[in-house]
Image (spheres, rainbow, N blue to C red):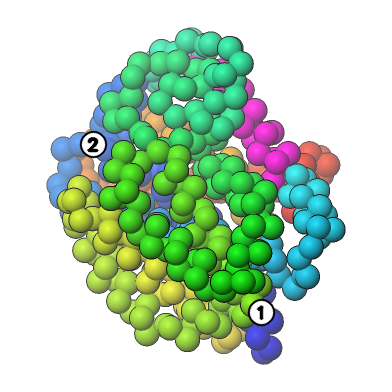
Amino acid sequence: MTTDAILSRTISYLRVPLTIGVVFIHFSLQRGLEIHGVFHGLNNPGWFFFIVNLMSEVIARLCVPTFFIISGFLFYYRCDFDQRVYQRKLRSRARSLLIPYLLWNLIAILWQLKCFLPIVSHYFRPVEIDLTLSRVINTFFFNSDNQGIFIGPAPSVPNPETYPIDGPFWYIRDLMVMVAASPIIYWLTKRIKALLPAVLFVLWIATPFLFPAGGYITMLITASFFFAWGAYYSIHHKSFVLQLSQLKYLGCIYPILAIADALTKGAPFNAYLHRAGIIFGIILIVSIAAGIVARGKDKTWQPLTDSCFFIYALHGIIIGDIGKLLFTILHVPENNPYCMLALYFGTPVLCIAMSIGLHRMLKKYVPPISRVLNGGR
């Protein structure tokens, strides 16, 4: 199999497990399951929270950085980047990123209106609506912590980071920023080569120290580093799959780092340990995927590949409600760790299955809507 074939098939193979990982990020029971302001399941034993942390807060956190690497690589792949190419890519990304971004956040707004339905309102915190222009804009771009049109009680754990109302779409938001800045990234990468991702790497590692309060700047640094990392390989005609696979033995360190990361959540040094783990973890998962592809064992995910974007877009809107519904209908005993663990794994599986089913229905019966929501994918 040629290097290009391994590259293409590895990227395709990675999309499904990376998407599944993102789904698990957004159903972390690290702080319990919140229903109407009450957090359930907080009295479970330490091993339960270790598993949740390891899955949602450690391993799954490899997924979005890897998506940024892939996006940076593909953006410059096999093109002589100039003004004409830039304009063409802007038009292309408007269709594949901007339009779905606006539509899915609008869908999330409409879905949020369910809070006002008497039959389900007792599951949610009471909210008010403020349609001032600034709050409408924030809803689409910086919705966190009562900054959007839906205003409720102050969150129990303030979040300094900023997300659109369809939370996972912060990746698309910041990817659009990277696309807008792509001529600068290209120019710098052509001239200083690996120095650009190296400088951004140091900045990314240092963000807990430089920006201890977090905020949007830390998210933008994350996007910039990983996008530039992928771009470097593409601009200098290297396969990131081949390059990282050559470091596969370094990836063997990751399981140790992952366990240490999960065990030390909340410790002052954990943010740095977590970042180190992400680098080694990316090396490991890319190497594993490339090995599977090289042996021709990559057919497993193919039926699910075309649903990945739809799963990514929809799950952030519905997964919390699915978890609350299952918890309530099944009368899950919140202090039984085995039942709560079944809820933790079962909710993302059900959410993914529902997303795939809905996507296939739309694709079959209303393909134009499916194409628009999927950004033409």
Give the residue type that dot 2 points to: Gly
Residue beneath the point at 77% across and 45% down:
95
Q: Residue under circle 2?
A: 41
Question: Looking at the image, is mark 1 or mark 2 nearer the viewer?
Answer: 1
Foreground pick, 125 / 134: 134
Dot 1 and dot 2 residues touching (CB under 8 Å): no
Q: Residues within 10 Å of mark 1 (few under 14, many from 20)?
A: few
For residue 104, which quarter of the picture?
top right
Q: Quadrant of the N terminus?
A: bottom right
Cα–Cα span, label 1 and label 2? 50 Å
- Residue 15: horizontal and vertical position, in percent? 58, 62
Q: Residues within 10 Å of mark 2 (few under 14, many from 20)?
A: many
Left or right of 109, for residue 213 = left
Give the answer, above or below, for where 183 lies relative to 236: above
Instruction: Tell me the number on the disc at residue 334.
Output: none
Label 2 SS:
loop
Instruction: Tell me the number on the disc at residue 237.
Output: 1
For residue 72, which quarter of the picture?
bottom right
Residues shaded magenta: 96-115
- Residue 223: horizontal and vertical position, in percent? 51, 53
The answer, for residue 318, to whether it is visible in the render is no
